Image: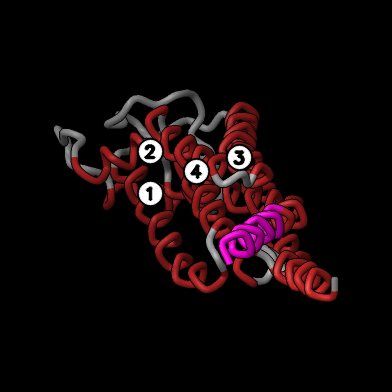
Amino acid sequence: MSGVARSEKGQGTTAAGGQGGRPPVLDNGRRRWQWMAAAASGVVILLMMIALLPAPVSPFFQGLDTWWHSVATAPAGYKVSGVPALLDAFGRPPGIVVFLVIMAVLAFTRRWWAVLFTFLCFLVPSLFAQVVKNVVNRPRPADPFVIVDHGSFPSGHCVQTAAFVVLVAVLLSPAVRRFWWPVGIAFVLVMMWSRTFLAAHWLSDTFAGAVLGTGVALLLWWLFAPLLARDDARSAARKNRRKQATA
């Protein structure tokens, strides 16, 4: 009886700590509020940019947009291929496959809250991007090299990329997560470059997209943190039961 009690106590300790004894996704209230503050700051920045765009005169950042467009856009006659083509596909229907694979892996491991979180990280930022596109209705640069829809602000590709980076960070263990952030930030920056290189967006569109995608994903992280920790706890408990069954 005492052995069972110790076993159950050990399971509870591991489950509370998360999968493999790691801390929960956001391991304390202070950290959660830090991410919430970061998300709120991004929303404020985005709203300020939206307020400036419909002004009677061009916003102060239009000069930077025009200069960057003149130096960073692909030369006339460029045929889209290589990295720009792959990045363009990531923000279109082929990119959905990446999210579906992540959801399938999470479903296989029965991390159901993480499955829902992944789905929302794909859907919600994209919906916000479409709403902002329709509200602002900013014209795109002339003669883009790829097929584009209406509205240049913000970049939907950058929204999806930034949200994806946050999503992966959430799903990784804290030990691995710190190595992922530099890779993820580089991914976002390269996506920002590619959208301007292809004349699909102004530079400020890509910045706004990165801010929007990051902010919405961080907000979802803040909301889902306790639920994701439950997923980790259940996963750790199942692992402990398997170990005890084979002991």
Q: Of helix, strand and loop, which one carries label 3?
A: helix
Q: Which of marks 1 and 2 is in front?
A: 2
Looking at the rendered structure, which numbered label has been put on residue 90?
A: 2
x and y, in percent, of residue 231 in the image: 68, 52
Dot 3 or dot 2: first in sequence order is 2
Relative to 7, is 221 above or below? above
Quadrant of the rendered image containing residue 14: bottom right
- Residue 199 position, x and y percent, is 33, 38
Q: Determine whether, in the image, residue 57 is placed left or right of residue 5.
A: left
Using the numbered discs, state the Cα–Cα distance from disc 4 to disc 2 in whole angstroms: 19 Å
Q: Nearer the viewer, mark 1 or mark 4?
A: 4
Which residue type carries mark 2?
Phe
In primary-sequence order, the first of circles 4 and 3 is 4
Point out the tag, 1 or 2, that comes first from the N-terminus: 2
User: Measured from the top left, where is residue 52 in percent x and y?
Assistant: 63, 45
**Lower position in the chain sequence, tag 4 or tag 2:** 2
At label 3, which amino acid type do we have? Pro
Which-is-in-front pick, marks 4 and 2? Answer: 4
- Which residue is found at the position 22% from the left and 43% from the top? 74
Report the side of 63 relative to 237 (left or right): left
Depth order, front residue of 172/158: 172
What residue is pinned by disc 1? 191
Q: Which residue is drawn at 63% across and 47% down?
A: 111
Q: Do the residues labelled 1 and 2 touch (CB within 8 Å)?
A: yes
Check disc 4 and report its element: helix, strand or loop: helix
Counting every numbered tag in the picture gives 4
Q: Mark 3 points at which residue?
A: 125
Q: Does the magenta stretch include residue 14?
A: no
How far, Cα to Cα, is label 1 from label 4? 26 Å
The Cα atoms of the two marked residues, 1 and 2, are separated by 10 Å
